[in-house]
Image: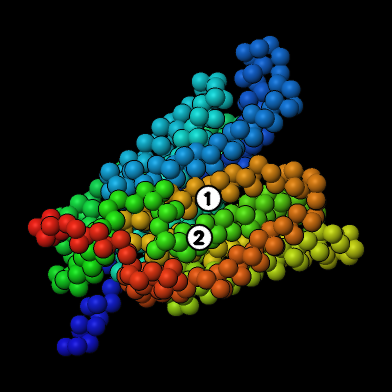
């Protein structure tokens, strides 16, 4: 009997929970990855379209600088939109709920998908630039809301695996865009508008299917004060009727936070009881993007060509690298609950650090021996492997785990803003770093990997298998506050009838 109780407390992956994860991650996270990669392969054909459109309008072609500027704007609108999307996360999830925010967010995917698909027929490159901003907003919202939604749906023993699922679908999106972006498929003169427009398909499927799945029980009980709806959602997600234990845990979280009310971003920065949590997500999100993952992808094609891969075959090798990314993220899905978050992210950053150092040496000594360029390829694959194990999937998962309900939306706004601003910064300045430092560019990323690793080792605790309240108690000691929320003292001045409401 006792064993039965124990097995009940240990949540299982029910069909409802698995399908909710699949639909949320495929409908949102997949698109993020897809749009990161979709414009890379058809870049030359799209530039030709920009030039031809401008020539038709003005009777003269674009000069090289203006063409480069227009293309840079088209690419960088995506991370800029991501930053805007991150700022919308708090208001959206508090107004519409987690599921509601994802459904609303599909506007920012379906509309630009139609616009990009029609851009060639309409002879307007402006539609592409506007659409890249809109799909960026979509990615900014989804990259924060999906981990939050899944983290709140999952039982504590599955929170890590479901928290990695969004990153898995991001890597799948990148790989699918690379495959569809082969010259023989859609990366050609007539196919590129279809390649860009396909991003609307997952959004349309999510819009149809997600309404049939539960809202976050934590949102329903803590923010909507609807215990009946929260119980119903938990029963569907867990596959059994006895959910009193989880309801009680959510209630305790609610009581611990009630004095705080809604926590804005400004309030988050002022609260001593959340100091180390906030510092940790800023460093983890900054480290994730500034450690050079986008630069590695940017540099990969040149490394492959120098290693003797034919220009026409580079697209296949790049897709192969994308496949490695998917496989390693898939592995992280299974080992995150076995090894824990801390070990995975430390291991990942250490691999990235080593890969950056060796890659610098091989790029400097490229012509020293015929086998040196092949070491460069191994370094690229090693880096991608390391990043997929920890730095890519774990930071968003940790935001869900180290913040309680009232502060979680603001924390995701801060983490998401750091993520997208860092992404935008690397995209903007890396070409200049590369021009100035050449092969030594990766020393900068190695230093960032090292500093982030040291911080994680000294400060970030293990969160595997702990409730949100237990994790918060760890940080309470670190922040040197007497309670989870010392401001709870304010409740003493409230009449009993009010405080019980």
Residue 134 appears in the picture as rendered: yes
- Residue at image mark 1: 418
Residue that protrudes farthest toward the front in the picture: 493
Q: What percent of the width, then of the height, locates residue 479?
A: 44, 68
The residue lying toward the viewer, choosing from 473 and 314, is 473
Residue placed furthest toward the right: 368
* Residue drawn at x 74%, y 60% as measured from the top left: 443
Which residue is at a point 58% across and 68% down the rendered structure image? 455
Quarter of the rendering containing residue 376 = bottom right
Image position of 182 (left or right of 408): right
Q: Residues within 10 Å of mark 1 (few under 14, many from 20)?
A: many
- Which of 135 and 484 lies nearest the eye of the viewer? 484
**397 lies left or right of 209:** right
Most foreground residue, 476 or 310:
476
Local packing at callout 2 (Cα closer than 10 Å; few below 14, some 14-19, many 20+) is: few
Nearest to the eye among marks 1 and 2: give it.
Answer: 2
Question: What mark, if any, has residue 279 been given in the picture?
Answer: 2
x 81%, y 64%: residue: 361
Q: CA distance from mark 1 to mark 2?
A: 11 Å
Which residue, as the protein is rendered here, is positioned at the far left? 497
Residue 48 pos. (x, y %): 66, 27
On screen, residue 458 above or below 442: below
How does the figure colour the protein chain or chains? rainbow
Q: Residue, x 22% and y 64% (percent of image)?
A: 255
- Please report contact status of discs 1 and 2: CB closer than 8 Å, yes or no: no
The x, y position of residue 456, in whole percent, is: 55, 69
Secondary structure of the residue carrying numbered label 1:
helix
| Precedes in sequence: disc 1 or disc 2 | 2
User: Which quadrant does the N terminus fall into?
Assistant: bottom left
């Amino acid at each position: 009997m006792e064993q039965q109780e124990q097995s009940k407390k240990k949540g299982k992956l029910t069909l409802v929970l698995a399908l909710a994860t699949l639909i949320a991650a495929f409908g949102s996270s997949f698109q993020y990855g897809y749009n990161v990669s979709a414009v890379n392969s058809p870049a030359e054909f799209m530039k030709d379209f920009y030039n031809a459109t401008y020539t038709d309008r003005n009777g003269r072609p674009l000069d090289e600088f203006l063409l480069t500027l227009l293309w840079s704007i088209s690419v960088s609108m995506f991370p800029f939109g991501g930053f805007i999307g991150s700022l919308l996360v708090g208001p959206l999830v508090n107004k519409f709920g987690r599921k509601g925010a994802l459904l609303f967010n599909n506007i920012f995917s379906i509309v630009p998908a139609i616009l990009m698909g029609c851009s060639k027929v309409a002879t307007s490159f402006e539609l592409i630039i506007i659409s890249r901003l809109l799909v960026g907003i979509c990615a900014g919202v989804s990259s924060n809301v999906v981990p939050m939604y899944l983290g709140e749906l999952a039982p504590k023993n599955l929170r890590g695996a479901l928290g990695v699922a969004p990153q898995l679908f991001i890597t799948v999106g990148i790989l699918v865009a690379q495959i569809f972006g082969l010259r023989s498929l859609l990366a050609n003169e007539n196919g590129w508008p279809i390649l860009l427009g396909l991003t609307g398909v997952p959004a349309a499927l999510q819009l149809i299917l997600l309404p049939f799945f539960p809202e976050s029980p934590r949102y329903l009980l803590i923010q909507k004060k609807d215990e009946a709806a929260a119980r119903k959602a938990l029963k569907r997600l867990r596959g059994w009727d006895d959910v009193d234990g989880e309801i009680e845990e959510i209630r305790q979280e609610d009581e611990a936070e009630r004095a705080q009310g809604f926590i804005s971003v400004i309030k988050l920065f002022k609260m001593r009881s959340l100091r180390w949590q906030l510092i940790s997500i800023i460093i983890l999100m900054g480290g994730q993007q500034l450690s050079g993952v986008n630069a590695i992808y940017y540099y990969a094609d040149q490394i492959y060509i120098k290693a003797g891969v034919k220009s026409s075959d580079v697209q296949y090798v790049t897709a192969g690298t994308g496949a490695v990314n998917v496989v390693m993220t898939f592995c992280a899905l299974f080992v995150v609950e076995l090894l824990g978050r801390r070990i995975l992210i430390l291991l990942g950053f250490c691999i990235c650090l080593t890969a950056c150092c060796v890659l610098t040496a091989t790029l400097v000594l490229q012509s020293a021996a015929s086998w040196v360029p092949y070491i460069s390829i191994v370094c690229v694959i090693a880096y991608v492997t390391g990043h997929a194990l920890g730095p890519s999937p774990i930071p968003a998962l940790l935001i869900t785990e180290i913040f309680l309900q009232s502060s979680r939306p603001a924390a995701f706004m801060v983490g998401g803003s750091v993520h997208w601003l860092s992404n935008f910064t690397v995209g903007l300045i890396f070409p200049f770093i590369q021009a100035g430092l050449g092969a030594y560019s990766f020393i900068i990323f190695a230093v960032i990997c090292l500093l982030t690793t040291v911080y994680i080792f000294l400060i970030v605790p293990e969160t595997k298998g702990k409730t949100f309240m237990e994790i918060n108690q760890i940080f309470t000691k670190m922040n040197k506050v007497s309670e989870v929320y010392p401001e709870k003292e304010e409740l003493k001045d409230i009449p009993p009838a009010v405080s019980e409401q």
